[in-house]
Image: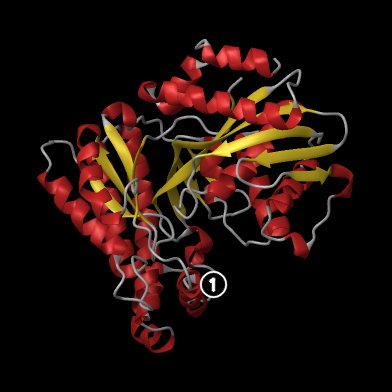
Amino acid sequence: MNTYALKAHVFEGKLDEVLTALYGAKNVEVQRARYISAIEGYEELYGEGKDLRLFSVPGRSEISGNHTDHNHGKVLAASIDLDIIAVAEATDDGVICIKSEGFPEDRVKIADIKVDPDKFFTSYAVIEGMCDGMAKAGCTIGGFRAYTTSNVFKGSGLSSSAAFEVMVGNIIRTLYNNEISDIEIAKIAQYSENVFFGKPCGLMDQMACAVGGFIAIDFADPKNPIVEKPSFDLSGMGYSLCIVDTHGNHADLNDDYASVPAEMKAVAAALGTAVLRDADEKKFMEILPTLRETVGDRAILRALHFFAENRRVEAQTAALQAGDVAAFMAGVRASGNSSFKYLQNVYTTKNVSEQGLSLALALTEAYLADCDSDKPSACRVHGGGFAGTIQAFVPTEAADGLVALLDPIFGEGATHILMIRQQGAICTL
């Protein structure tokens, strides 16, 4: 379809079934307008085209396994109904052109791709890395033009960068290589971020964005993670996922984030292993007196968090498989409690007067305890922590009340009512 036919297709409701599955029935009208706007953005930049396709890749929310993947732990995550959408068309000129709304256009000549430290931390480098990684995986790489727009807000722990990486792979897969799996695209996205973008990230974000729904990942072997997808529709059970952006200051938090894997690995080294996943927990408990002298108490507490989180992820995954909402929510609360007390990533000790996450958690816990619902609920720190966002699983009928409570405190629009989306990286048309 060209842009005119594609806009008519969306306007006439012929994409509504897909939009309902991705965003919920109440959001179809808004999403129709959003997709039409994206098609118009493509048209303004590249013309009407001939064979346009539509794509969607979700953001993600971490559920449990907080700060464990870097020590080869287990993680439970889920995709959400905030996403990047793209309008794209294949070309025969060997050039990839991507214009993301609000950002300059990237133009990557496939024949000239190479690792360049001067391009680290740019979207240009991500595109190059995805092409290189897919080529190394035996995929055909070809040119295309794409216009993208995203409502995965940055700095939220929802992985806007991973969604963009996966989107590039999603477009190349659909236009040239339909046989490549979501899991393989996620691995290539990690390669792109590690090698071309210059960030030594794990695989959780890319995997959750690519695969969709709830996803349990065991990183015992990071190059070959074990992926399990519990079949459970939390939204269908009458729950909303609320993400609350406390608008905390993210400046000068690098040391806080870096200290977590460093201290866990210091405990592992004392136990004769490179990462905590390979350490003997029984031996760890036996040598605690010595560890207090060598690595300090906070490192020990963070190791205790790691060992318990792996068990929690297993229990929560089993709860989802069994449809046991109460057990799942108990796991969310326990993971959040451990993150606060043992991992200690709810506020930075560099600025103890600013504790927006702690305040948001306290208010949300009180609200959920008092709201008129017999459904179990939970809240916890979200993502990396220290500043940023909390997460709450709220009975859908109580979600608006949480917005009314928290938005006057943290700012209008701070509380986002979301749903767990079952689809990962897809071509919508």
Q: Position of residue 237 (x, y in %)?
A: 27, 28
Mark 1: few/some/many CA within 10 Å (<14, 14-19, 20+): some
Regarding mark 1 in the picture, which secondary structure is present there? Answer: loop
Q: Is residue 179 visible?
A: no
378, above or below 374, in the image: below
81, above or below 344, in the image: above
Answer with left or right where residue 198 lies relative to residue 11: right
Q: Position of residue 345 (x, y in %)?
A: 37, 67
Task: Give the amino acid at mark 1.
Answer: Thr
Q: Position of residue 378 (x, y in %)?
A: 24, 47
Q: Nearer the viewer, residue 54 or 104?
A: 104
Which residue is rendered at x = 40% and y = 74% of the image?
Answer: 283
Q: Is residue 251 visible?
A: yes
The residue carrying mark 1 is 273
Answer with left or right where residue 230 lies relative to residue 172: left
Q: Nearer the viewer, residue 376 or 198?
A: 198
Q: Which quadrant of the rendered structure holds the C terminus? A: top right
Which coloring applies here? Answer: secondary structure
320, above or below 108, in the image: above
Answer with left or right where residue 23 lies relative to residue 428: left
Answer with left or right where residue 415 lies relative to residue 194: left
Which residue is rendered at x = 66% and y = 15% of the image?
Answer: 4
341, above or below 66, in the image: below
Q: Nearer the viewer, residue 217 or 147?
A: 147
Quarter-wise, where is residue 305 in the image? bottom left
Which residue is rendered at x = 23% and y = 37% of the image?
Answer: 400
